[in-house]
Image (spheres, rainbow, N blue to C red):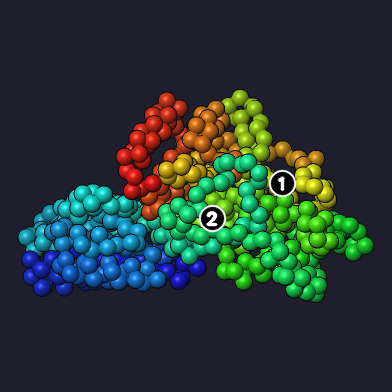
Amino acid sequence: MFDNYEIWWVTGAQLLYGGDAVVAVDGHSKEMVAGLNQSGNIPVKIVYKGTANSSKEVEAVMKAANNDEKCVGIITWMHTFSPAKMWIHGLQQLKKPLLHFHTQYNKEIPWDTMDMDFMNLNQSAHGDREFGHICARMRLRRKVVAGYWQDSEAQEHIAVWARVCAAWADAQDCLILRFGDQMNNVAVTDGDKVAAEQVMGYHVDYMPFSDVMPFFDAVKDADVDALVSEYFKLYKHDKSLEDKSTVAFKKVWNSAKAELTLRAVLKAKGAKGFTTNFDDLGDANVEQTGHGFDQIPGLASQRLMEEGYGFGAEGDWKTAALYRTTWFMTQGMPKGCSFLEDYTLNFDGRRSAILQSHMLEICPKIAADAPRLEVHHLGIGIRKTPTARLVFTSKEGKGVAATVVDMGNRFRLIATDVECIKPKPLPKLPVASALWIPEPDFKTGAAAWILAGGTHHSSFSYDITPEFWEDYAEIAGIEYLHINEKTNLEDFKKELRMNEVYYMLNKSLC
Ligand code: MN
């Protein structure tokens, strides 16, 4: 889906050095943009938009970027000294994410041959500082990447930002459908949906169960049968599950019908994510209406998450949107992402860890081995009927979990580095799970998360680095806290207090 997007590259120059210099700058820029695209490191195509040599030209390209749906961000680079007052009006207009790339066409100083003509063409050492000054003076949110354009390390920083820009564009046209509200009285999953749309772009709507039922009724039995066959082909399972006379088979069949219903609703509404709540989509409605979902659609949520739909349990629309963004920006990356919940603790000295799971809804992308399709009693909800789900444990390795909370005057994004370790089997709790130790250790990482007011829900990925969330928070203009191997509680508390003052003083960011 990155194919739908572009990043624009604008080179800053001026006409002081004569037309020949600008022609050379233009040639270098084309070569650099082609080089970045050919590197294979940057998943979004970079499009060269020419040199900007005057205030009028800067303003024109910024306005064009704002109005171009494919353009998800702008990279600027000052090949020559580009007097930065000429950037003011254009930058005031810019609504797309900005990356300032501090690089140079030429790699090494040609000591023996360097003359003034060379200098006129390789001036980013001071040109980029002039541009940086005006961005700082204007308090612009942006990413600065410094490095040689052919180095993969510099390219990787641009790649992260490009992925986040694409996910940001995706979020600006994102509907999260809520099947039901928050669980009664739950605070952390709630928040200001109007502010969320203003700040992060996505829209959240309620979908009453009565509006879901026509979709449920329209699902054809033959399509359900076909999906059940697909399940049996895709997933390991006990052969007995295929016995159509059993309750277990009926539960698999009902799960397939729920999946087809939800997918049809999401497609019809153009939604990119959803939340469930077992009081609404689950068992209670079967009691009331005589037909409908016989249990919360756990297997459907697992499979829709894998497809890229944002998911949040118990009405958690912020995590549903964050998961959609996580999934979107990690497209094509190998290890996977999931909605997760802090489930239960395992105290084991320095290896103390948190079991991550949920009743049912964990994305199979993070599974270590092929998931198993199983039907078990679900000990929650009103009817407590057996329910189909994919059961697995997750890969080992490092990852990042993130959440967004509403602090009343601002949104706060908290990211925590974690190490997933091998869990022991859970024969009596047949759900998907992960087991992680937060960085720098359980006692610090968990305490920091709690001090920051983090949820018991998170959007987790093995593939992203904290830089993704740093870029996302910068683009959104929200508070960013990162719990990592260097975190100590004394400094972390100071950061929380400093941020409180910062956001009180900067009301425009709230
Ligand atoms: Mn929960």
Query: Viewer-proximal residue, 38 or 399?
Result: 399
In this picture, residue 388 sits left or right of residue 153: right
- Return the disc, 2 or 1, that comes first in the chain's sequence: 2
Label 1 element class: loop
Q: Residue at x 72, y 51 (%)?
A: 279
The amino acid type of the residue labelled 2 equals Ala
Q: Residue at x 66, y 61 (%)?
A: 208
In the rendered structure, find residue 435 and report the number of the disc placed on it.
none
Position in image of residue 20 (x %, y %): 11, 73
Label 2 element class: helix
Position in image of residue 371 (x %, y %): 72, 54
Q: Residue at x 45, y 52 (%)?
A: 195
Position in image of residue 150 (x %, y %): 31, 59
In this picture, residue 95 sits left or right of residue 381: left
The amino acid type of the residue labelled 1 equals Met
In this picture, residue 41 sits left or right of residue 259: left
Position in image of residue 376 (x %, y %): 82, 49
The quarter of the picture where residue 89 lies is bottom left
In the rendered structure, find residue 359 and report the number of the disc placed on it.
1
Q: What residue is shown with label 2?
A: 321
Marks 2/1: CA–CA distance: 20 Å
For residue 339, above or below residue 351: below
Q: Is residue 377 visible to us here?
A: yes
